[in-house]
Image: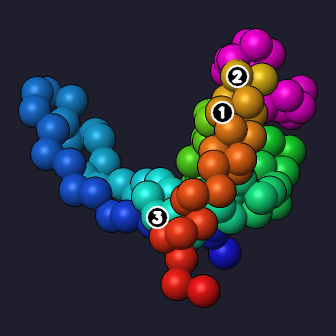
């Protein structure tokens, strides 16, 4: 289960190495207000735990989620961003949570 929608993206590569690269990928992003509120309210905690602590131990085909790494990454993964950057992202999320006008987008 995912907290945001997945999108299938086709890719056309050029060059001699093109045959070795995937022709499509799946990505996800929180485009809707509903998804952003879910994420800001902590809806991604289980995903963060999976990508930071469980995924590195499994021999499966699954993406490395660089942006899920915040203040407590797994010891098996190198730091992808500084603590200051992580805190800045958290501050931005908190600012968005304080934007109560965004709730007007819902039909309550």
Residue 38's label in the rendered image is none
Determine the CA span between mark 3 and mark 2: 22 Å
Q: Can I make out residue 62 in this image? A: yes
Classified by dominant secondary structure, the portion drawn in magenta counts as loop
Q: Across the whole image, how many numbered discs are drawn on residues?
A: 3
Q: Which residue is mark 2?
A: 88
Q: Can I make out residue 76 in this image? A: no
What residue appears at the point 52 percent right and 63 percent down from the top-left corner? 33
The percent position of residue 21, horizontal first and vertical second, equals: 29, 41
Residue 92's label in the rendered image is 1
What residue appears at the point 33 percent right and 64 percent down from the top-left corner? 8
Q: Which residue is mark 3?
A: 32
- Local packing at callout 1 (Cα closer than 10 Å; few below 14, some 14-19, many 20+) is few
Element assignment for label 1: helix
Residue 71 lies in the magenta stretch? yes
Determine the CA span between mark 1 and mark 2: 6 Å
Position of 35 with respect to 25 (left or right) is right
Magenta stretch, residue numbers: 70-85
In this view of the protein, which residue sits in the foreground, 20 or 2?
2
In this view of the protein, which residue sits in the foreground, 103 or 86?
103
The percent position of residue 78, horizontal first and vertical second, equals: 75, 19
- Local packing at callout 2 (Cα closer than 10 Å; few below 14, some 14-19, many 20+) is few
Residue 16 lies in the magenta stretch? no
What residue appears at the point 20 percent right and 42 percent down from the top-left corner? 19
In this view of the protein, which residue sits in the foreground, 99 or 76?
99
Element assignment for label 3: loop
32 is higher (above) or lower (below) than 20: below
């Amino acid at each position: 289960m995912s907290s945001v929608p997945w999108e299938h993206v086709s890719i056309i590569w050029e060059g001699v190495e093109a045959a070795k690269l995937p022709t499509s990928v799946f990505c996800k992003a929180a485009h809707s207000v509903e998804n952003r509120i879910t994420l800001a309210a902590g809806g991604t905690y289980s995903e963060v735990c999976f990508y930071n602590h469980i995924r590195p131990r499994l021999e499966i085909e699954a993406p490395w989620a660089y942006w899920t790494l915040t203040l407590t990454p797994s010891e098996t993964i190198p730091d992808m961003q500084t603590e200051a950057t992580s805190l800045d992202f958290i501050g931005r999320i908190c600012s968005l949570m304080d934007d109560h006008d965004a709730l007007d987008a819902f039909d309550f």
